[in-house]
Amino acid sequence: MPGLASNDNSPPAAAPPARRLSSPLPRRAPPSPSPSTSSRAKPRKPAAPAAEADESLDNPDLGPFLLKQARDAMVSGEGGGAARALEFAERAARALERRGEGAELELAMSLHVAAAIHCGLGRHADAIPVLERAVAVVTPPPGPAEGEGEVQAADDQQPEQQPEADQRGEEWSLAAFSGWMQLGDTHAMLGRMDESIACYSKGLEIQMAALGERDPRVAETCRYLAEAHVQALQFDEAEKLCRKALEIHREHSAPASLEEASDRRLMALILDAKGDYDGALEHLVLASMTMVANGRDIEVATIDVAIGNTYLALARFDEAVFSYQKALTVLKSARGDDHPTVASVYVRLADLYHRTGRLRESKSYCENALRVYAKPAPGAAPDEIAGGLMEIAAIYEALGDLDEALKLLQRALKLLEDSPGQWSTVAGIEAQMGVLYYMIGRYADSRNSFESAVAKLRASGERKSAFFGVLLNQMGLACVQLFKIDEAAQLFEEARAVLEQECGASHPDTLGVYSNLAAIYDAMGRVEDAIEILEHVLKVREEKLGTANPDVEDEKKRLAELLKEAGRSRNRKQKSLENLFVTNSARAKKEAGRRWSNFGFRS
């Protein structure tokens, strides 16, 4: 991100006496005298140093000097390191705030430095208010209203001041853009993707207003925001931004530029997530050709892995194996046999051979990857190793080795549980562990894992995704096994609301939640509600799958049992979704000894 520079870094003419504050935090006000001590409040010697400090902050050269000291302390790391740099930055902010008009940019820079130090110390939450203040400081003032003739006359008399005003506006816009982007990064580190995307969008808006919509720097920001949308699983918005970045780079860059190749790789990832594998393959091939032309062998190998993934999704297995083996040869030669990127290719080959039924080769490649992850090369990223362990755990789960899969997930969780900005990944690991605990019959552990994952997704603002709805459904199933019926009903109802919004009422995942909700209503004695839901499920399944499908037959048997119990026959009249889930609050629950219904729940 672009930074700001102070105009004057020279030391002040009258420097204050050198001293160290006892704390990098702002000075507290002295306590007011109590009645018991007011008689002894005559001597005021302790207040003299504070008065001197207040007077020293009025020196107009002190702020830039302290700002330079803060930056030097950050770079050198000597004399107290980050704590001393934070002290300098906060004192610089107080001094610059006293200067008022004309010191806004330097004040914003000092606040940016203080926020960066907070983030470096792992105190991201403390950096948020500092950055919000920095953004407020450099918010451009509103332009003059129409019809202000006096202002126009003054501009006519002093035309030479206009370029200076324009330059000031550009500097303010640059500072505001930098602040919004830094604020977005900080929210992302706390897992707040919605707030992060909102900050990035505001920064992009300011940048486009200052530079124009077709500037190459705008393209970089569009791609950055598109990546954030991908992390939030908002692929439509990501595709729009990535296409705009690609258009700008094709307009301003040379043919087959590296910027265009980066855009195409991101576009391929987005299209792959949306199921457009042919479109993704096209962008990957073009990106690979660009990287070959620029001599980027390692990037070519990375793209080959992505091409192999796309071939695998298209069931073109031979071409996928060729792409993986080609990438494996290059990565082994360039980075060594113990690099995590080599292990990631082993994992992809293991997945491919598992899908094609060659289980011995699949397990062999899993073992090769685990040997690399056990002793990775220096500098290996924990999230990369954790991602590989998650994929191997999924393969072991498919092979039926649930205990080994659970051990691998626990290793992955240990690598990431204290990492900032990894809440969504940790939630995914905990969700996968919850499924495994459920499969081996440890329902209490399953519910606890799901509960932890749900809490993280709620905190990170991902409560509107389809994955969140599926996770609520799985947690409800665990609660059913623990006989927590009311809690299960609440979870199924929330899952239904999420999946109806994200996937639609006819999606298979939504229908599965409907079936579970009907079962739980039956167990609670709400037979009429269960019948209404199950009639809708059966109607949709008959339309989508046909009357001879096994799932349809299963639903028919469930509905027939409920109708027989209620003394009714199936109502084939079409019902609107508005009246589908009307609850019958007047109906009393059946006796506590009522046996469980013998139709099951859907995971």
Image: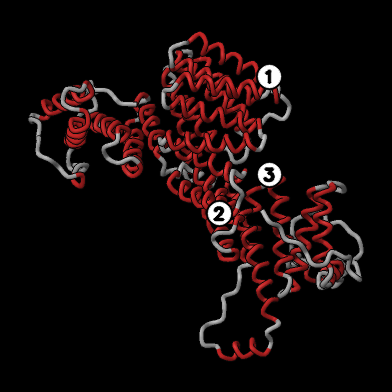
Residue 203, image x and y in percent? 57, 58
User: In the displayed image of the protein, which residue is found farthest to the top?
Assistant: 360
The answer to whether residue 585 shows anywhere in this view is: no
Q: Are marks 1 and 3 in contact (CB under 8 Å)?
A: no
> Which residue bears the numbered disc 3?
122
Identify the amino acid type marked 1.
Asp
Q: Position of residue 118 (x, y in %)?
A: 70, 50
Q: Tag 3: residue type?
A: Gly
The image quarter containing residue 422 is top right
Q: Nearer the viewer, residue 520 or 141?
A: 141
Quadrant for the C terminus in the image: top left
Cα–Cα gap, marks 1 and 3: 34 Å
- On the picture, is 76 further left or further right than 533? right
Q: Is residue 353 above or below residue 448?
A: above
- Above or below, comparing residue 330 to residue 583 in the picture: above
Dot 1: what SS? loop
**Residue neighbourhood size for the residue with mark 2, other residues' Cα within 10 Å, grouped as few (<14), some (14–19), many (≥20):** few
User: What residue sits right under mark 2 in the picture?
Assistant: 251
Left or right, residue 256 beside residue 88: left
Q: Residue at x 71, y 75 (%)?
A: 101
Q: Residue at x 45, y 45 (%)?
A: 234
The residue lying toward the viewer, choosing from 303 and 51, is: 303
Q: Is residue 51 above or below residue 333?
A: below
Q: How many marks?
A: 3
Give the number of the mark in front: 3 or 2. Answer: 2
User: What is the x, y in percent for residue 325?
Assistant: 57, 19
Residue at the spot of label 1: 337
* Residue at image coords 56%, 63%: 212
What is the CA distance from the residue labelled 2 to the residue labelled 1? 41 Å
Q: 10 Å neighbourhood of mark 3: few (<14), some, or many (≥20)?
A: some
